[in-house]
Amino acid sequence: MTETCTKTHDGKTHDGKVVSVVGDKLTTTCSEGKQHCYTLVKDAKVTCDGKASKAADLKAGTCVRVITHKDDKSVATAVESGKQIPATVHKA
């Protein structure tokens, strides 16, 4: 299985699992086990099961969908978590 990456009207989305959140830095792993680092914009929209949340609430192992800036895939404008995000399967 490969990382889910789809275009949205503003940028792209990336599904993965949280490795860590430190300040405005979010690190995730994709289905291939590769780490991806994002810088969260100051007003990044973070949700859990559709409800407003904070980046600090994202715990290691949580499945997330990261929405990146249309011009810079290392900048996250929103992060969604919850039951609607499919679990990421790592290659063996």
Image (cartoon, grey):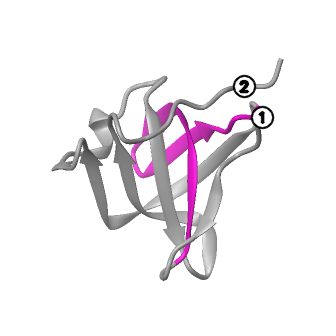
Relative to 53, is 27 on the left or the right? right
Out of 10 and 40, give the one closest to the viewer: 10
- Callout count: 2
In magenta, the rendered stretch is 11-32
Q: Secondary structure at mark 1?
A: loop
Q: Position of residue 72 (x, y in %)?
A: 62, 74
Q: CA distance from mark 2 to mark 1?
A: 5 Å
Which residue matches tag 1? 32
Q: Position of residue 7 (x, y in %)?
A: 59, 72
Q: Answer whether labels 2 and 1 touch (C-beta < 8 Å).
A: yes
| Kind of residue at badge 1 | Glu
Secondary structure mostly seen in the magenta stretch? strand
Q: Residue at 80%, 25% (x, y): give it.
A: 91
Q: Residue at 78%, 34% (x, y): give it.
A: 32
Q: Residue at 35%, 34% (x, y): give it.
A: 58
Which residue matches tag 2? 90
Pick the quarter of the image with the C terminus.
top right
Q: Earlier in the sequence, mark 2 or mark 1?
A: 1
Structural crowding at the residue carrying mark 2, measured as other residues with C-alpha within 10 Å and reported as few (<14), some (14–19) or many (≥20): some
Out of 8 and 39, give the one closest to the viewer: 8
Structural crowding at the residue carrying mark 1, measured as other residues with C-alpha within 10 Å and reported as few (<14), some (14–19) or many (≥20): some
Relative to 10, is 37 on the left or the right? right
Q: Position of residue 33 (x, y in %)?
A: 74, 30
Q: Is residue 28 magenta?
A: yes
